[in-house]
Amino acid sequence: MNIHLSQDRIQIHKITDDDELPWELLLLADPSREFVSAYLANGECYIAKLQGELVGEFLIMPKAPDVWELMNIAVTEARHGQGIGKALLAEAIRIVRQYGAKTLEVGTGNCGFMQLAFYQKAGFRIVGVERDFFLKHCAEPIFENGIQCVDMVRLELSLTT
């Protein structure tokens, strides 16, 4: 997929053996290397490059024949606010639709205001909260926006409408 950002062209492709895993970005979105490794083993990782520079990634994983989950999405800090995250999400949606998905799910921390806004602007709806998720699954506390990440907010996007 090629997306134009002003004069530039972003290229998004599924990671191959020739590509280096974007660990810095993967761990930016999820600090658990163990979790990310499990997602990589069961899902598909895509990377985005802009003029040869790695600028983002996303990782999708099937949960059921018609349900996929966006397990990980990140954009390099220097490229925030340039529409790359929107382009990555649009490509993830396009791909899971091709696979026959009727629903795309995502989970994010209760303290991630920007992430919650990002997903809701894209049409995702909050469907639940996994209480104490980060307390149970993370060895070290995670803080964002001065708030400890305790609960995982679950969101869904219907792909049938």
Image (cartoon, rainbow, N blue to C red):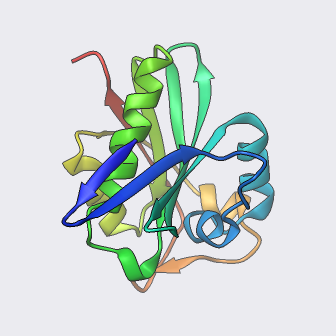
* Residue 19 picture location, percent across and down: 71, 56
| Corner quadrant of residue 79 | bottom left
Residue for point 26% across, 72% down: 81
Quadrant holding the C terminus: top left
Q: Is residue 140 above or below residue 92?
A: below
Q: Nearer the viewer, residue 103 or 99?
A: 99
Residue for point 71% across, 59% down: 136
Count of numbered circles in the view: 0
Q: Nearer the viewer, residue 69 or 45?
A: 45
Q: Is residue 148 above or below residue 136?
A: below
Q: Is residue 60 left or right of residue 10?
A: right
* Residue 99 picture location, percent across and down: 50, 18
| Corner quadrant of residue 93 | top left
Q: Is residue 24 above or below residue 33?
A: below
Q: Nearer the viewer, residue 139 or 94?
A: 94
Q: Nearer the viewer, residue 101 or 79?
A: 79
- The reply to whether residue 127 is in sight is no
Q: Residue furthest bottom?
A: 146
Q: Is residue 20 left or right of residue 6?
A: right
Residue for point 81% across, 57% down: 34
Quadrant holding the N terminus: top left
- The reply to whether residue 4 is in sight is yes
* Residue 69 picture location, percent across and down: 53, 35
* Residue 101 picture location, percent across and down: 45, 18
Q: Is residue 147 above or below residue 133?
A: below
Q: Is residue 78 left or right of residue 5?
A: right
